[in-house]
Amino acid sequence: MSKNTWTLFAGLAVAMVTVGCGQSTQAPAVATSDSKATIAPVESKVLLHTKPADAKPVGELRTSAVDGADVVILGRIGGDTNPWVEGRAAFTIVDPKLEPCKPEEGCPTPWDYCCSTDLIPANRAMIKFVDDAGGTIEQDARKLLGVKELQTVVVQGKAKKDEAGNLTVLASGIFVVPEAK
């Protein structure tokens, strides 16, 4: 058999299998880090449909939490001009007792609490959503969780405190408190 005849038969065989099986020759879509296919499993693990009980506000938990303890923390996303850790499922929250600055008073970023800067250190916590290996999930929190600045959230996870008393919550779940209308 000649080389051209063999190529023709091979091409026809591939075409018949493709048509006969009703299969597409298009390659399957590959999930990327920004695709819903990748994000959906993480969302289903961390987005809580009911508000966890016994949430403590940031300021109270900063003083009472023990390193490694299970905690439930209540706070509002903010505490800095940019409370997000770019490309990671991490952000800062502040105690809901602090009042954000007023946009009508000329504050373009009320979530930075610039009118209460002296109160922020004792009333701020870092939230990090971690994977099974303990690393911060490499997806933007805004996209992954559908959250934005000044939203009130309840987060459950494990407390991690440093020598300076800063509190990080290695988060396993989040409940976004519906905004009042």
Image: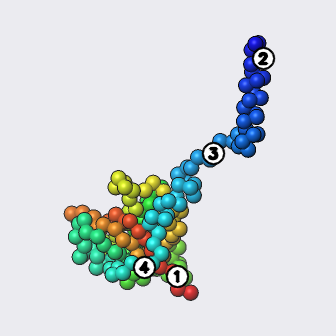
174 shown above or below 97 = above
Identified by mark 1, the residue type is Glu
Measure the C-alpha gap from mark 2 to mark 3: 31 Å
Nearer the viewer's eye, disc 2 or disc 4?
Answer: 2
Query: Along the line of sight, which residue is nearer the eye, 133 or 93?
Result: 133
Q: Secondary structure at mark 4?
A: loop
User: Looking at the picture, how far across and down is residue 66, in whole percent?
Assistant: 22, 70
**Residue 96 visible, this angle:** yes
Instruction: Looking at the image, tell me whether mark 2 or mark 3 is earlier in sequence order.
Output: 2
Instruction: Looking at the image, tell me whether mark 1 or mark 2 is earlier in sequence order.
Output: 2
Nearer the viewer's eye, disc 1 or disc 2?
Answer: 2
* Quadrant in the picture for residue 157: bottom left
Measure the C-alpha gap from mark 1 to mark 4: 14 Å
Q: Which mark is residue 179?
A: 1
Instruction: Looking at the image, tell me whether mark 2 or mark 4 is earlier in sequence order.
Output: 2
Circle 1 packing at 10 Å, graded few (<14), some (14-19), many (20+), is: few
* Quadrant in the picture for residue 98: bottom left
Left or right of 135 in this view: 36: right
Q: Which residue is mark 4?
A: 51
